Image: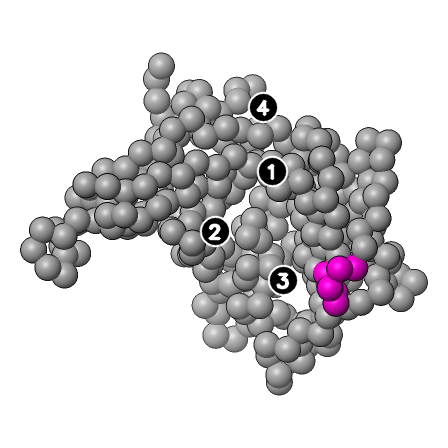
Amino acid sequence: MKHSKIYTISILILALLPFLLTNCEEVMKDFELKKTQAQIVIDAQCSSFTNTAIVKITKTGDYMNPGEYPKVSDAIVTLSFNDTTIVLPEEFPGEYYKYHNFPENTLYTISVTIDSKVYTAQSFMPKKVELTNLSYRVSEYSSYMQTYPGELFYVSKMEFLDPQNETNYYRIKITKNDTLFKSANDILLTDDIYFNSDTIEYEPFYFFKTNDRVTFEFMSIDKANYLYYTTLVQAMTSTGNFSVPDNPTSNFTGKVLGRFIAYSSDTLSIRISE
């Protein structure tokens, strides 16, 4: 079978921007939003991989006191799909959870009521695209990175089968040991517009050492969330001196920030050894 590689610069948005699934939660607090007046922020996700729906509701902090994000309690949160509607109870202040066997290839609608105002969003959960292989090799830069003679550095490569005759959007999360890479530079996104074969390879520019455990999570997301993450990266990496970047494009109705994502994912792990 012919293989096609994900090239970091010429093909994909994976590294088109100086880069964060996880998510809004992972990075929303790492930059100052455009608005100075407090706004509702809804970080909502539904996953067939974890069988959980999680909604976290806060308000943006005051411009002069960044880092303070008041939690929003007593909201009414419902999630609808097919002929089912479930209520997400508030388990912690501003945090709403529900465990359920969420089906893939399904459109989800979330409704959040706060002080009699209703905010809704939709997200389509695609079918899971499986990772078929995870491997590693000694990096060609290993000799330049050594802190003592003979030290080796490795890079890891993932492979997957991209479904043909349909448009797919992906996000890739990478964890080293127990640490998830989650800065703006770690938002790895791609669509499959330039893929011309079933088997796709991707080798991200991360370095690992002997005994490191490397985990790839391969998320299948919808177009709206693909656009959300790309605008989030643009906002986080803007270098303009005289203007403030726009807020990421939300899929919620009403004047709120954040997003709702329904996603499927597959994971593979590998231990680096000499």
Does the magenta segment cover residue 258? no
The answer for how far apart the CA atoms under marks 3 and 1 are is 29 Å
The answer for how far apart the CA atoms under marks 2 and 3 are is 17 Å
| Residue 17 horizontal side relative to residue 32, left or right | left
Question: Is the Cβ of the residue at disc 1 closer than 8 Å to that at disc 2?
Answer: no
Name the mark nearer the viewer: 4 or 2: 2
Asked if one can make out residue 6 in the rendered structure from this viewpoint, the answer is no
- Crowd tier of the residue under label 2, counting other residues whose Cα lies within 10 Å: few below 14, some 14–19, many 20 or above: many
Pick whichever of labels 3 and 1 is earlier in the sequence: 1
- In this figure, which residue is indicated by the disc labeled 1? 49
Pick whichever of labels 2 and 3 is earlier in the sequence: 2
Residue at 52% over, 34% down: 266
Pick whichever of labels 1 and 2 is earlier in the sequence: 1
Residue at 63% over, 62% down: 247
Residue placed furthest toward the left: 149
Q: Which residues are magenta?
A: 90-95
Question: Is the Cβ of the residue at disc 3 closer than 8 Å to that at disc 4?
Answer: no
- The label shown at residue 187 is 2
The x, y position of residue 65, in whole percent, is: 62, 83
| Residue 170 horizontal side relative to residue 60, left or right | left
Name the mark nearer the viewer: 2 or 3: 2
The answer for how far apart the CA atoms under marks 4 and 1 are is 22 Å
Q: In the structure shown, which secondary structural element does the residue marked by tag 1 occupy?
A: loop
Name the mark nearer the viewer: 1 or 2: 1
Residue at 84% over, 48% down: 87
Does the magenta segment cover residue 92? yes
Q: Amino acid at mark 4?
A: Glu
